[in-house]
């Protein structure tokens, strides 16, 4: 029997502005997470490091999120969620300002990790807030709306940040992203209601229950493989476009815009598809994404075919996010209802473990057998998620029967 006491009944009038505030902050966070993808060559040249080393800015950030999300969520679970949202954006601003002031790669990497601490907690509590603001049958769509900020960042923030970084230096991009954090604080202060319900504080024993729960651990593994597989190729998308497909650096900004547009469409579609049955939707999303990634290996050398495949990759890349997050929220409410926030945080950690693994594996591939092999190996990771999703479906069917 699903626990629904966690759901807060709020008017649509009160819920929509709060969702907008969450999306605004998510836009800033999404921009800072992914903009190095478009600036790897710029950063590597400026700091005299290899492309693979620059790729650590993606995986290092992801590791910061993975470790910071569950720990900081547990430590802050007694704070007002509105106060916490605003405090997280302060950390976000500080981290990006430190990045802008960095003169060495080590300083830049540390600044990125500091910024990452705000990321994980924001999306973990943001997901539960978004789910609480709407009726149960709209929860995946509400989470998708919040993540719209993340996807819009890939549409406009990343290509714009790439353009600014190429024209004025990557530090200018960091200052611009810090400004987005200030806008995020203002949005949360004005649009998030003061009386938003805080999640009940979870005990340490409840948090341990999450790590002992099979269905939840399986869901985390699905997230890491299914979402992370794309990043084997996506982390090195700019070098792929320049070195394999033959596009200029200026054309890459435009292509990233198209990729981001596909991501935004996919995220919205994925939220609607996952409202009824997340597991069935996720199975088909992962299956199609694995096929697209493997196909990219063969189409990347050709401009038209390569661009079409990359657009489809973007369409599927974030389509699974709402389904994965609502799957974990639903499972946590079913098995460990007092630790939903922490379960959500662990899933955000799983997203970023997937990114870190994907970026790391991609770096190994680039240094060994070549960048052209990154897509199909990423596709194999996603096939792993297909298998685990089918397994999870069987477990849940047996659970509902019993």
Image (tube, rainbow, N blue to C red):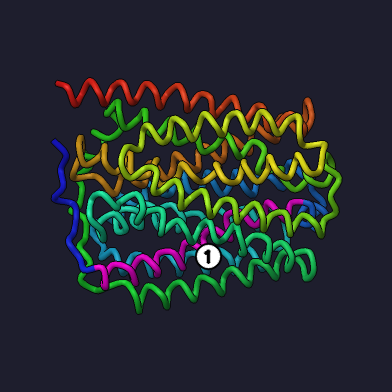
Which structural element holds mark 1?
helix
Q: Is residue 312 above or below residue 16?
A: above
Q: Nearer the viewer, residue 94 or 2?
A: 2
Quarter of the figure with residue 167: bottom right
Q: Position of residue 185 (x, y in %)?
A: 43, 74
Q: Magenta span covers which residues?
A: 12-40
Quarter of the figure with residue 236: top right
Is 263 positioned to the left or the right of 144 in the image?
Answer: right
Q: Nearer the viewer, residue 206 or 18?
A: 18
- Crowd band around label 1 with a 10 angstrom C-alpha radius: few (<14), some (14–19), many (20+): many
User: What is the number of callouts on the image?
Assistant: 1
Is 183 positioned to the left or the right of 203 in the image?
Answer: right
Q: Nearer the viewer, residue 175 or 135?
A: 135
Residue at the (48%, 48%) spot, across then down: 65
Residue at the (79%, 52%) spot, across then down: 41
Magenta-drawn stretch, dominant element (helix, strand or loop): helix
Dot 1 corresponds to which residue? 28
Q: Position of residue 321 (x, y in %)?
A: 45, 45
Residue at the (51%, 57%) spot, across then down: 150
Quadrant where the image shows the C terminus: top left
């Amino acid at each position: 029997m699903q626990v629904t006491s966690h759901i807060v009944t709020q008017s649509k009038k009160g819920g929509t502005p709060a969702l907008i505030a969450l999306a605004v902050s998510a836009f800033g966070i999404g921009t800072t997470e992914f903009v190095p993808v478009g600036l790897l060559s710029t950063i590597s040249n400026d700091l005299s490091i290899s492309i693979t080393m620059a790729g650590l800015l993606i995986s290092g950030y992801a590791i910061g999120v993975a470790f910071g999300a569950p720990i900081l969520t547990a430590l802050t679970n007694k704070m007002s969620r509105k106060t916490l949202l605003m405090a997280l954006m302060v950390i976000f601003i500080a981290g990006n300002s430190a990045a802008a002031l960095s003169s060495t790669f080590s300083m830049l990497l540390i600044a990125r990790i500091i910024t990452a601490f705000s990321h994980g907690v924001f999306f973990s509590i943001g997901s539960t807030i978004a789910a609480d603001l709407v009726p149960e049958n709209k929860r995946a769509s509400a989470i998708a709306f919040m993540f719209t900020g993340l996807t819009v960042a890939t549409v406009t923030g990343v290509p714009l940040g790439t353009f600014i970084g190429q024209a004025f230096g990557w530090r200018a991009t960091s200052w611009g992203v810090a400004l987005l954090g200030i806008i995020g604080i203002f949005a949360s202060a004005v649009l998030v209601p003061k009386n938003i319900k805080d999640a009940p504080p979870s005990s340490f024993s409840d948090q341990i229950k999450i790590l002992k729960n099979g269905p939840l651990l399986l869901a985390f593994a699905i997230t890491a493989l299914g979402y992370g597989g794309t990043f084997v190729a996506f982390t090195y998308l700019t070098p792929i476009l320049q070195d394999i497909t033959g596009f200029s650096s200026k054309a890459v900004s435009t292509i990233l815009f198209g990729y981001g547009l596909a991501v935004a469409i996919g995220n919205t579609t994925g939220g609607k598809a996952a409202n009824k049955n997340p597991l069935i939707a996720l199975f088909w999303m992962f299956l199609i994404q694995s096929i697209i990634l493997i196909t990219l290996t063969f189409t990347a050398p050709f401009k038209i075919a390569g661009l079409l495949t990359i657009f489809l990759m973007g369409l599927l890349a974030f389509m699974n996010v709402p389904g994965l997050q609502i799957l974990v929220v639903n499972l946590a409410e079913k098995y460990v209802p007092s630790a939903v926030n922490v379960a959500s945080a662990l899933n955000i950690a799983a997203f970023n473990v997937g990114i870190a693994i994907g970026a790391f594996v991609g770096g190994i591939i680039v240094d060994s057998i070549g960048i052209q092999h990154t897509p199909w190996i990423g596709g194999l990771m996603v096939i792993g998620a297909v298998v685990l999703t089918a397994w999870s479906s069987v477990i849940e069917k047996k659970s509902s029967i019993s």
